Amino acid sequence: MLFLVGLGLSDETDITVKGLEIVKKASRVYLEAYTSILLVDQAVLEKYYGRSITVADREMVESNSEEILRNAQTEDVAFLVVGDPFGATTHTDLVLRARELGIPVQTVPNASILSGIGACGLQLYSFGQTVSMVFFTDNWRPASFYDRIKENRDIGLHTLVLVDIKVKEPNMESMARGRIVYEPPRYMTVGQCAQQMIEVENDRQEKVYTKDSLAIGAARVGGLTEKFVAGTLEELCSADDALGPPLHSLVLLGRRTHELEMDYVRQFAVDKEKWDRIAKEEYGKQ
Amino acid sequence: MLFLVGLGLSDETDITVKGLEIVKKASRVYLEAYTSILLVDQAVLEKYYGRSITVADREMVESNSEEILRNAQTEDVAFLVVGDPFGATTHTDLVLRARELGIPVQTVPNASILSGIGACGLQLYSFGQTVSMVFFTDNWRPASFYDRIKENRDIGLHTLVLVDIKVKEPNMESMARGRIVYEPPRYMTVGQCAQQMIEVENDRQEKVYTKDSLAIGAARVGGLTEKFVAGTLEELCSADDALGPPLHSLVLLGRRTHELEMDYVRQFAVDKEKWDRIAKEEYGKQ
């Protein structure tokens, strides 16, 4: 059996009791470690589970799944995913390959950023499609997120923006010299995300949002050090110190934001007077 | 401290290790039991936790929260919520009242139907806003879901339809005679939901969807007996036997459904030939 086990959002005790029992008994334990991270190290997990863990990077999952699925017809293999197995990234490919090999699959759900973000005080019901923001480079500035946000905002909905993480990225210079050296991990911040959003609005000028649109920066959602900072996109450009360490994500408010949602989020506002003024002028409209 | 503890979707072992530790130590334990249910009885939970549980019905949470929050400035109170505390229903009111009383609040996230539904094979990224379907009566047929679905479908997105549950509803006849007698619990099925959707389309005639639109019926998502049935809304009207016991929910596909999503969902189709034909004609368009 292949078990896809969600680990939740924060630390080693966020695994479910069901998940923990599976991990303790499985023949092999893999940790998917390229789409998200927990706030604790692998060594902490290994000690807590009493098991050694093989870190599965993107290459292993996408190109070398035979190793993960080896003998899973008769043995139990646990594949651990931060958050929920169907959360930010699906592992449909791995499941399909398992099925082809006659391997039964069972999923153990857990908290996902898609529901955990509700802690900011916005109704999960009123979120539109989720978008992703990647690190822009000089010549790669994918802006499809802008069209998706436009669709959400046209009907008044909030948008959750998940931000890029770069783990185990090869250094290009070394690659050119025939050596593989990995860059240190990089986690996009709310400030970087807000800055890129403003840049794209400046390029496109379709007024999907402005630097004065209200948004919420979120850090370490679901953990004990969870932190929210609310403000305009411009204000969020300099909120990284207040938010602290990764992982970050951002929510852009929809104009249908209810008064009660606004009141709740207000407690996190950088500048409450400004928040109230923009909230009154621009939001709460059906 | 007030702890809002998510229980996950299925049975007693879906609680997180962190949540279980809180429940074991809390002074009092409440179970919110009117917006969703687990697939196991309260007695199973009590035995598993080694604690007695007070069931908190809607009236208690909404009108008698003083009891829940009593002494929570100095004692730990655990308020258990099926799924994720911020999932289908938020308990913002309770949190706000706790804050007014100077009671710190901590949330323990868990799996929600909003992410668990990803097991059907559709990308969670491509869901629009979530809607709710209530039991229609002769003179109460709220159809705001229809407008919300229209908004989602206009931009090609999937819609998760959460269905009504009626727990501890007073019998109207008895009430008129001055006695309170509760009706047995009722859980809406996918068949009833699909039927009501078709009725509203027949009333409104805006072609937001038709009886031939593709949808997925889901039952006991996240549990060992999880079951999906895919087909047209008309086919889903008679899929209740195949789906089995509650809880049910329904997903209406958006026209942006990707080929890979379609292939995955196909395994659940009542009539694969019909599924393929409609999928080819109507879906996968940007």
Image: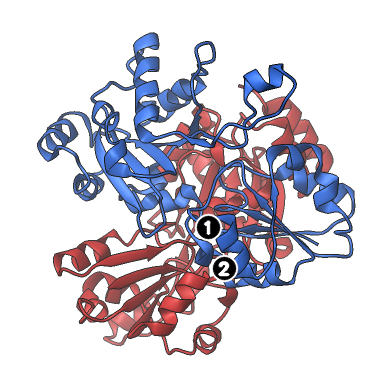
Chain colours: A red, B blue
Please say whether residue A220 is visible from this viewpoint.
no
Direction from residue A122 to residue A37 in the image, left or right:
left
Please say whether residue A285 is visible from this viewpoint.
yes
State the mark number for residue B20.
none
Q: Residue furthest left?
A: B273
Q: Quadrant of residue B181?
A: top right
Residue at 30% across, 50% down: B121
Residue at 59% across, 34% down: A254
Specify the amino acid type for callout 1: Gly
Between B261 and B57, which is closer to the camera in this rendering?
Answer: B57
Direction from residue A98 to residue A171 in the image, left or right:
right
State the mark number for residue B16.
2
- The numbered mark, 1 or 2, whose residue comes first in the sequence reads 1
Specify the amino acid type for callout 2: Thr
Residue at 57% across, 53% down: B84
| Residue under label 1 | B8
Direction from residue B160 to residue B171 in the image, left or right:
right
Whole-percent x and y of residue A184? Answer: 48, 79
**Mark 2 element type:** loop
Between A55 and B114, which is closer to the camera in this rendering?
Answer: B114
**Label 1 close to label 2 by CB (< 8 Å):** yes
Question: In the rendered view of the protein, which quadrant contains the N terminus of chain A?
Answer: bottom left
Using the rendered image, report if marks 1 and 2 lie on a common chain.
Answer: yes
Spatial separation of the CA atoms under disc 1 and disc 2: 8 Å
